[in-house]
């Protein structure tokens, strides 16, 4: 069983969805296979169940913080659904976004949209019907498809999930490939990231603080996070700060605002 620990905050639809997720054997298997492709066969960072749990929690925190700041989710603005439906969209997109790795990393975002379609139908069955079911399903697929750097999301939910995906950069994610001998800029830079904090911002709604133990971690910020921020469609809501700790002292290394 897939075990998630999400703060549901009274969202009964999300609670039922998560119950369905945790019982779904096909989804569990796809996440296991995704990690075999990513870690065992390609020597890159984790793309399995641990990764999607982190992305799901980060996505939900960011979405709720934006809503608190007055930002309206796209499914609410465009289709007159509720904030609780936006949470369902963003969580299922986070859980399913990397499942295409079960086939291959190349164009995995496309493959994820193709073979997760029936899984989404199953996971939201009984919660939505007719037009609303179609809207929720395809908003999830949109967020899944647009999480890669080259694709610009057209929804708040897609942009939030895209950034949350790139914020899973703490060193634990790189530990397995690093241990088995995959030493490259991706694993070295990820090993330098000690902690990522997502907070309410002062200048903008969201402030992300990245704590690093080595300047190699700046690759994660400059080459990975910055690009996803630039193409997220929601980068204007974020302030990113990278802090480096040396000799017990922490100093601001870089501040990014898109």
Image (cartoon, helix red, strand yellow):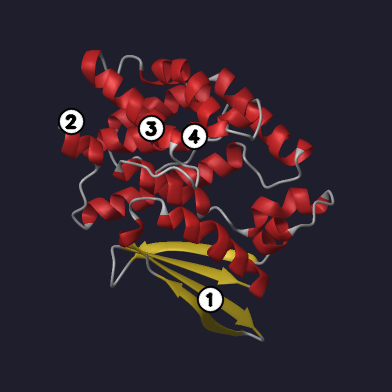
x, y percentage for residue 82? 20, 35
Disc 4 + disc 1, Cβ < 8 Å? no
- The kind of secondary structure element at disc 4 is helix
Q: Residue at x 40, y 36 (%)?
A: 143
x, y percentage for residue 26? 58, 18
- The kind of secondary structure element at disc 3 is helix
- The kind of secondary structure element at disc 1 is strand
State the residue position of label 1: 243
State the residue position of label 4: 95
Q: Residue at x 29, y 19 (%)?
A: 134
- Quadrant location of the C terminus in the rendered image: bottom left
Q: CA distance from mark 3 to mark 2?
A: 15 Å
N-terminal label among 4 and 1: 4
Q: Say which of 93 and 141 sits in front.
A: 141
x, y percentage for residue 157? 33, 42
Q: Residues within 10 Å of mark 3 (few under 14, many from 20)?
A: some
| Res 12 label | none
N-terminal label among 3 and 4: 4
Nearer to us of marks 3 and 1 is 3
Disc 3 + disc 4, Cβ < 8 Å? no
Q: CA distance from mark 3 to mark 4?
A: 14 Å
State the residue position of label 2: 79
Nearer to us of marks 3 and 4 is 3
Q: CA distance from mark 4 to mark 2?
A: 23 Å
Q: Residue at x 18, y 30 (%)?
A: 79
Q: Residues within 10 Å of mark 4 (few under 14, many from 20)?
A: many
Q: Residues within 10 Å of mark 1 (few under 14, many from 20)?
A: many
N-terminal label among 3 and 2: 2
| Res 142 label | 3
Q: Viewed as shown, does residue 127 lie left or right of 76? A: right
Q: Is residue 255 above or below residue 36?
A: below
N-terminal label among 1 and 2: 2
């Amino acid at each position: 069983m897939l075990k998630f620990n999400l703060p549901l905050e009274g969202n009964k639809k999300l609670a039922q969805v998560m119950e369905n997720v945790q019982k779904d054997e096909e989804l569990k298997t796809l996440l296991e296979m995704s990690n075999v492709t990513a870690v065992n066969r390609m020597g890159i960072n984790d793309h399995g169940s641990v990764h999607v749990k982190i992305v799901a929690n980060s996505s939900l925190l960011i979405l709720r913080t934006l809503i608190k700041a007055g930002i309206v989710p796209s499914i609410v603005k465009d289709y007159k659904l509720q904030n609780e439906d936006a949470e369902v969209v963003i969580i299922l997109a986070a859980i399913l976004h990397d499942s295409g790795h079960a086939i291959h990393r190349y164009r995995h975002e496309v493959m994820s949209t193709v073979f997760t379609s029936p899984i989404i139908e199953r996971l939201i069955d009984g919660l939505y019907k007719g037009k609303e079911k179609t809207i929720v399903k395809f908003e999830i697929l949109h967020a899944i498809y647009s999480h890669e750097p080259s694709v610009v999301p057209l929804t708040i939910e897609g942009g939030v999930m895209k950034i949350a995906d790139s914020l899973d950069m703490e060193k634990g994610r790189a530990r397995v490939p690093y241990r088995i001998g995959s030493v490259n800029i991706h694993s070295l830079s990820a090993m330098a990231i000690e902690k990522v904090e997502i907070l309410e911002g002062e200048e903008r709604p969201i402030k992300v603080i990245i704590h690093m133990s080595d300047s190699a971690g700046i690759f994660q910020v400059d080459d990975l996070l910055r690009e996803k921020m630039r193409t997220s469609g929601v980068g204007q809501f974020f302030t990113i700060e990278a802090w480096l700790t040396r000799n017990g002292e922490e100093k601001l290394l870089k501040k990014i605002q898109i």
